[in-house]
Structure formats: C-alpha cells, structure tokens
C-alpha cells in the first residue's frame, strides 16, 4: 500500500480518471476529490499529525497563487502538480518554489507519474526511524515461528489497523504462500537476486495484499539449493520494507548461522519461539547463548499446556534465565485447520485461546498507545460466513 493518503484536485474529465487509475495501480488510498483549490480549502481541515499527498491538476503555471496558498495552509504535506502543455524549465522551478514537490506534464505518462510518486514516498512517506521492525525466529525448525509471525502480522494490521508488511526471509523455499493460500508473482528470492538493484518500487510490486493493511512477500515456492543472497541484499530488502509500512514482521528461518544473527541485529524487537519440551528448551538456551540474549528478546513458548507438570512458565523462565516469558496456548487442531484452510486464525477460529495469546503479544509489542479496532456485528458475521463459504468451495 502507498504510505500516503491522497487528495485529488482536478475538474478535467480526461485527466482525472487517469490520475485515479494510476493511484489504484500503486494501492494508494484516495481520501477525497475536489474541483479546485478554493473548494478544498473551504471543506478540508487536517489535524497536525495527518499526512496527505495533494495532487493538483493545473491548466498552466501562469497563476500559482492558489498553489502557494495551499502549500501554506497545509505545510509539510507534499504537493504533486499535474500541468497541461509543455511549460518552461523556469516555470517548473517557480512552481516548486511555490510549494510543488514534483511536477508531471500532460499528456499523461504513467511512468513519469510513478517516478514522481516514488520520490515523494521516499521524502515524505514512512519514516524509517519510526517504522517498527519485529523479527520472529524459532529456536529450531518446527517451533511454530512462521505461524506466530503470520498471525501476529494479521492481528497488527486488522485488529489494530496498522500498515504492516510480512516478509518471509527464506531464499531457498518458503511456506507462507501455502499458509495464506496466495499465488505470488514474485518471491523473496526474486528480489534478493536483484542484489544492489533492490528498491522499494520493486518491493511494492512484489508484495501481495492480504486484508486491508497487510502486504506479504513469501519465500520461493520451489526449492533451490544453489542460491545464497548477499548480506547487502538482505539489508537492502529490509530497509525498503521499512520505507513502506509502520510495522515490518520478519519471519527469519532458524539456521543458527551468521546470516540469521546478522538479520536479527537489524530488528527493533526479536521474538524467539520455542516449545514446552526439553530438546526445544535446550535449543532456546543455545540461541540465547549465541547472542540473541543481547537483544533482550521476547521469549515465547508455543503450544503451551498449563497443566503439564514440571514445565510451568516460572520454571522455564528460570531455566532460560529470562525475567518474563510469553506463552501461546496449545490449540493444535484449530491451528492445523487454519493452516489447511490457508487463512489466519482470526478468520477461521476467532475464539481460539492461541489467538488470544497472540493478540496479547501484539498488544505488548505495539504498546498501549495503539487503539484496538475490532470489527463486530453483522459485518463481522458476514465476513466469517463468507470466509467459511470460500473454504468449502475452494479447499486446498
């Protein structure tokens, strides 16, 4: 999803549909459309923290007073000017001094428009310093880290209404496409093969939307043992993801090699997933010893059975040497059904005890300042009914 909501100012019946079409092509939300700047100024009032991209269509650059007025009223918000004809370089420079961040000419060229959007996104979009990077990794394969990462991303994006990207950082083979029943045109490996040519435009086109605010980049569907991405490519991909979303969830394979720990070093928060079994607890201790402890990770015990004697949360915390332990309740049958349906738990089993624990984990990771926005009533019932119908019609 394009990180800035857009407001269009145009009364041209030929240009307006083209602007709308190209905004939809980059998954940009259109927040309003007005015939001219005075009408916009009269009807719109933005709070200090609200960021918008104004797209202003002008017949010419002869009279820029309305543009200057708009720029002054909504200081700090970018303005993209779409102008008819072929104005001089000096006229374009003057328009930029009066408040235009970018100028695009009509006849309308889609590539030129996209480049302008790309530049504005880089300058005014998601601030990398404010974007949250959460790395989820298992203490060993099969601990359930991918299931937790997937449902964590879905909860953050849907329940808490936060723009989120879920990246499966497996360059050999992945499972997210199966877990979500999606058919990606491009995978993590495709982007990592681009190496130093990776940019957020390429990532934007590779992402698969899933729900209102969640986008997914899954690992490759077919295995490949002869490709090893460079460290620079992985870091570049992560940086691009942080440009595009408020929260990025990394599903990091448990390889226990320098590449895994390099990736974890980039994260703001590391979630280390283990299970309620002696071998898994031993592997979790080993991961902590190898350097993950330095990140003050959130340690999660998956498939936790509170009745299992000798393996209560307090005892496991003491063994691991951590002050606080998160647990995800055991609910294997429901989780397996969710995976087989290719849907998150929220869509298949909203009352799952495991989901309640994942939701609580999401709340802790985001902080209490994020408002929870559950969708209830008839619309929620309709969505779940429709989802159940889709599962029955199109089983995996």
Image (cartoon, rainbow, N blue to C red):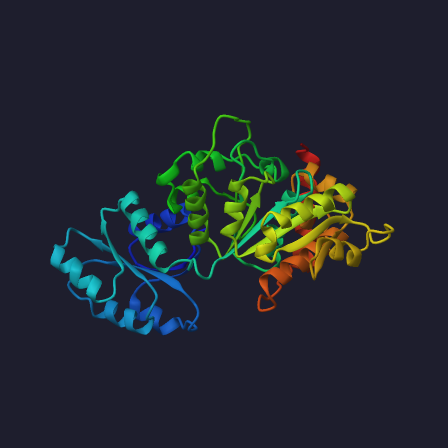
When asked about the image quadrant of residue 35, the answer is bottom left
Q: Quadrant of residue 61?
A: bottom left
Residue 241 visible here: yes
Tell me where residue 167 appears, x and y as whole percent. Answer: 53, 44
Query: Is 212 situated above or below 130?
Result: above
The answer to whether residue 215 is visible is no
Whether residue 15 sits left or right of residue 181 in the image: it is left
Q: Name the one closer to the observer, 260 or 213.
A: 260
Quarter of the image for the C terminus: give it: top right
Left or right: 379 with respect to 275? left
Q: Residue at x 60, y 47 (%)?
A: 290
Q: Is residue 104 above or below residue 231?
A: below
Q: Position of residue 57 (x, y in %)?
A: 27, 58
Q: Position of residue 49 (x, y in %)?
A: 44, 70
Q: Nearer the viewer, residue 32 or 152?
A: 152
The image position of residue 213, as x and y in percent, is: 53, 53
Residue nearer the viewer, 237 or 121: 237
- Numbered circles on residues, count: 0
Residue found at x 30% / y 70%: 38
Q: With respect to residue 329, does 335 lie above or below?
A: above
- Horizontal side, residue 60 vs residue 352: left or right: left
Image check: 176 left or right of 114? Answer: right
Q: Nearer the viewer, residue 334 or 72?
A: 334
At horizontal 17% and vertical 51% (from top left) the residue drawn is 85
Residue at 22 percent across and 55 percent down: it is 83
């Amino acid at each position: 999803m394009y990180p800035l909501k857009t407001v269009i100012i145009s009364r041209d019946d030929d240009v307006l549909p083209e602007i709308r079409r190209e905004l939809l092509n980059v998954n940009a939300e259109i927040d309003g459309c007005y015939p001219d700047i005075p009408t916009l100024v009269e009807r719109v009032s933005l709070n200090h923290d609200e960021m918008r991209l104004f797209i202003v269509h002008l017949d010419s650059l002869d009279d820029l007073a309305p543009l200057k007025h708009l720029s002054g009223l909504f200081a700090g918000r970018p303005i993209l000017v779409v102008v008819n004809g072929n104005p001089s370089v000096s006229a374009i420079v003057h328009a930029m001094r009066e408040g235009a961040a970018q100028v695009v000419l009509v006849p309308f060229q889609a590539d030129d428009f996209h480049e302008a959007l790309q530049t504005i996104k880089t300058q005014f979009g998601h601030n990398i310093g404010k974007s949250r990077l959460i790395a989820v990794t298992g203490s060993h394969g099969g601990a359930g880290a991918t299931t937790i990462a997937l449902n964590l991303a879905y909860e953050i994006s849907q329940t808490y209404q936060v723009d989120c990207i879920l990246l499966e950082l497996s360059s050999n083979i992945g499972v997210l496409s199966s877990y979500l029943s999606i058919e990606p045109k491009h995978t993590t490996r495709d982007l990592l093969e681009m190496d130093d040519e990776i940019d957020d435009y390429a990532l934007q086109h590779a992402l698969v939307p899933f729900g209102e605010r969640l986008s997914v980049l899954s690992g490759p569907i077919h295995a490949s043992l002869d490709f090893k991405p460079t460290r620079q490519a992985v870091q570049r991909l992560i940086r691009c993801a942080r440009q595009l979303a408020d929260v990025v969830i990394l599903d990091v394979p448990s390889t226990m090699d320098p590449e895994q720990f390099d990736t974890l070093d980039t994260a703001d928060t590391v979630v280390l997933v283990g299970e309620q079994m002696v071998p898994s607890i031993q592997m979790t201790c080993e991961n902590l010893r190898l350097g993950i402890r330095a990140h003050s990770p959130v340690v999660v015990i998956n498939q936790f059975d509170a009745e299992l004697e000798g393996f209560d949360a307090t005892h496991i915390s003491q063994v691991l040497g951590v002050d606080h332990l998160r647990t995800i309740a055991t609910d294997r049958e429901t989780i397996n059904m969710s995976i087989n349906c290719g849907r998150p738990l929220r869509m298949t089993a909203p009352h799952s005890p495991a989901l309640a624990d994942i939701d609580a984990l999401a709340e802790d990771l985001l902080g209490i300042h994020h408002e929870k926005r559950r969708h209830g009533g008839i619309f929620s019932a309709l969505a779940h009914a429709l989802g159940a119908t889709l599962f029955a019609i199109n089983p995996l």
